[in-house]
Image (spheres, grey):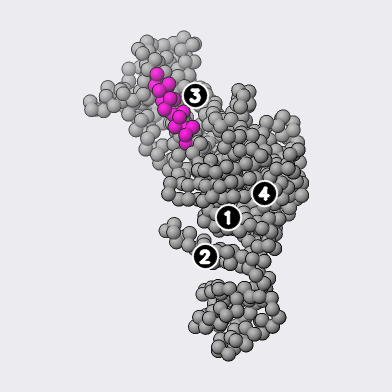
Amino acid sequence: MTSASSQPAIEVDGVTKTFGKVEALRGVNLRVEPGIVFGLLGPNGAGKTTLVKILATLQAPSSGIARVAGLDVVRQAGEVRSKIGLAGQFAAVDDQLTGLENLEMVGQLYHLPGSVAKSRARTLIEQFGLEDAADRRAKTYSGGMRRRLDLAAAIVNQPEVLFLDEPTTGLDPRSRIDLWAVIDELAKSGTTVLLTTQYLEEADRLAAKIAVVDHGLVIAEGTAVELKERVGGRVLAIHLPDADQIEPARVILDEYGATPYVDVAAREVSVAVGAEPGIVAEIIRALDAGHVTVADLQFRQPSLDDVFLALTGRASEEVDAELEGARR
Amino acid sequence: MNLRWTLHDSFIMTRRNMLRYIRLPENLVSITVQPIMFLLLFTYVLGGAIRVTTPDYITYLLPGILVQTVVFGAFATALGLAQDAQTGLFERFRSLPIARSAVITGRLTADVMANIFVATLMIGVGFLIGFRFGGSPLESIASPGIAILFALPVAGLFAAIGLTARSVESVNVIGFVAIFPITFISSAFVPVESMPGWLQPVADANPFTRAVNASRALALGQDTGGDVTATLIWTVVLLAIAIPLGVRAYNRPR
């Protein structure tokens, strides 16, 4: 990694991708410095996976230029492939091969000499805590073990840039936390990691820098702290005992901050408010004067959920629902 | 990508697919129990009712059922590739610095190996129930050889189907509907002359009939009457169709 410090690990300039009439990417610009975990955050269908596929040379962009480790992903695809690792949304392991055999095969396909591929496989099995299952076929693995094996396969070649496309989707909370620890370790070893996720918590936890993607565009970029600052101050969320009270509560909250967000199903109205002292008490008095009964109230640091809401005007779950609706 | 690495990558893929043959019970059955079962059922259940030109039905049947079995093996090619596409393994392979052709050539090579095994097994069992070669040793090897060669372009076409199909299940349906009429409307199990007049030209035009006739003539040590040449031409023509289709399907973004 001689020139790694002088050039970005990933450079994306005006990349678009259309599938028929669908514009999956509408001009993405991105710059990822080497050695960090970079999070691509966005709902299903935002274009995250398409971008990863382009960067991992699986698809060509419709227009624009993308470079990984300084190499053009279209014209130098072969060289790019020898410098990257990819763990896609499905754990890409051969069910009929054992954990060791899977890793050995990938090592051989990276053209490592036989003995090196063998010892590298052994090392990775230990590093990912799969010693006990090393000689068992992957079909006997749990979801979490498969993901770990998949991740191990992605770093057989000690890649400069590692792409993780929703690495913890479908995992139980325990396995997710395990996998986070593994990704942390990888990042410490100097590998640049591009991680996509729909879990705001995950990006917050793992990524030094985050780009929020929506409808094929990067709509915000920064550290988790910077993004949270964009919401401004803190978030006050009130829960109402019945649905009749939602509208009056919304009208009152509208006076105190940015446009309040209403979650009808949860009977919750939330609003980002300034940090002035006494604001919470003031709002409660106003609600009381407006005959709004409050069942519960939270005053919290904005989460990345709030960030997403502030940036797009929709909650990330709503986007999922919209997509579901569009598919039907 | 130099030739050495291309061969290396193809070899690694071949080995992987051969392991899958041995380890997946359904794959193993399809290359052992199933062909023997068909051979015995045809010989002892239908054999008595079918009038053939050879002294006994097994001599007539074996080359036919051999070609049918190896062509059926193309199913394995399509299914294997469709499975790989579905599990995301393809994405991994396509992100590796390997020869683009290795995934397909590795698959086809393993399937040819499986076919050689099946042919040996069937001829062995055939011997036990009365089959004998009637030609020279060279013709005796060429008889299963031409069957296995003919199976290659069929496997190539099925590879393209496997790579294009939406699911493993749809491969099954497409394959089933295509391959049963093609193998049965041929000289594989009964003489074409025994079919109704309107069906005979169809059976005669079927490249499968040419391959069966070529393999059978070689097994009996008879004059192949241009069937070997016709089979070789069909092989080349079908490969010329299958290769670009397969490569396009493989490189198609998914």
- Counting other residues with Cα less than 10 Å from the Cα at mark 1, is it few (<14), some (14-19), or many (20 or more)? many
Secondary structure at badge 2 equals helix
Contact check, label 4 and label 2, Cβ < 8 Å: no
Between residue A223 and residue A142, name the one nearer to us.
A223
Is label 3 or label 4 in front?
4
Q: Main secondary structure of the magenta part?
A: helix
For marks 1 and 3, give the CA distance.
Answer: 58 Å
The residue indicated by pointer 3 is B119
- Say left or right for A32 vs B220: right
Secondary structure at badge 1 equals strand
Residue A133 place in picture, x, y as percent: 70, 45
Amino acid identity at mark 1: Val
Contact check, label 3 and label 4, Cβ < 8 Å: no
Q: Quadrant of the N terminus of chain A?
A: top right
Secondary structure at badge 4 equals strand
- Say left or right for A312 vs A326: right
The residue indicated by pointer 4 is A32
Say which residue appears at 73% left-offset and 35% top-offset. Answer: A118
The residue indicated by pointer 1 is A218
Say whether mark 1 and mark 4 are on the same chain.
yes
For marks 4 and 1, give the CA distance.
Answer: 13 Å
Amino acid identity at mark 2: Glu
Q: Is residue A258 above or below residue A241?
A: above
N-term mark: 4 or 1: 4
N-term mark: 2 or 1: 1
For marks 2 and 1, give the CA distance.
Answer: 19 Å
Contact check, label 2 and label 3, Cβ < 8 Å: no
Residue A89 place in picture, x, y as percent: 58, 49
N-term mark: 4 or 2: 4
